[in-house]
Amino acid sequence: MSGDAHLVRGEAELRRIYSEPSRGVREKAIDHIDDFAKRFIALSPFLCIGTSRPDDLADVSPRGGEPGFVEVLDSKQLALPDRPGNNRLDTLTNLIRAPAVGLLFVIPGFDDILRINGTASISIDPELLQRFAVNGRTPRSVLVISVAEVYRHCSKALRRSDLWNPAKHIDPQSLPSWGEMLREQKRTILPARLIDFALRQDAKRNLY
């Protein structure tokens, strides 16, 4: 690293490095969920949700389900069920303090991404929870997202990564398992195989 002398300090300096965006790029965001966005959400089984932490750090968390697991309530609202996880509640506690939220919707095999920005509230309305019941289990809560910006993100990132190419998929054995990682980090004295077995069982029993 060359030190602070080469750090970019402001937007004006950034604009000396990068070209101005085209008018089409500047104006591509709309303030509601149109038919295209609704169709994209209905086909998407995975998204990333970004929130802000109270210590000024950011946080991004994955969410997934069957295609369409996020429901479009109307042209200005989405509903995202909170399925069982690790109970850290990072996203939810962040949203209680700062409701701003950013979503990236992904469709396997499709190189474009749908971006939605807005604010979120946490609902435990029984009727809303019941709409997301799976195998008789309802989520503990549902995020109701008020939409402020919606736009289609260009395909360059996914094209560069070649993410959907099976020939480039990594063998899971290339990385240590959860149990092996925790053992290497000296966070447990339990055998790695026992930890991995417990995690596999939890994924089977507590997916919803």
Image (cartoon, rainbow, N blue to C red):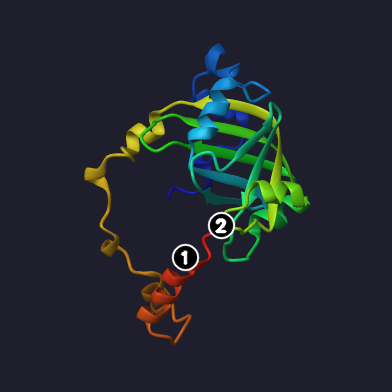
Q: CA distance from mark 1 to mark 2?
A: 15 Å
Q: Position of residue 175 (x, y in %)?
A: 31, 64
Query: In this view, which residue lies farthest toward the top?
Result: 23
> Hey, which quadrant is residue 37 in on the image?
top right
Q: Which residue is mark 2?
A: 135
> Hey, which quadrant is residue 116 in on the image?
top right
Amino acid residing under circle 2: Asn
Q: Residue at x 61, y 58 (%)?
A: 136
Query: In this view, which residue lies farthest toward the front?
Result: 136
Foreground residue among 82 and 206? 206
Amino acid residing under circle 1: Ala
Residue 10 visible in image: yes
**Precedes in sequence: disc 1 or disc 2:** 2
Q: Position of residue 191 (x, y in %)?
A: 38, 84
Q: Position of residue 4 (x, y in %)?
A: 53, 46
Up the image or down, 14 lies above or below 100; here it is: above
Q: Residue at x 54, y 45 (%)?
A: 48
Residue 55 visible in image: no
Secondary structure at badge 1 equals: helix
Q: Residue at x 49, y 45 (%)?
A: 66
Q: Nearer the viewer, mark 1 or mark 2?
A: 2
Q: Which residue is mark 1?
A: 203
Up the image or down, 18 lies above or below 42; here it is: above
Foreground residue among 34 and 13? 34
Up the image or down, 142 lies above or below 107; here it is: below
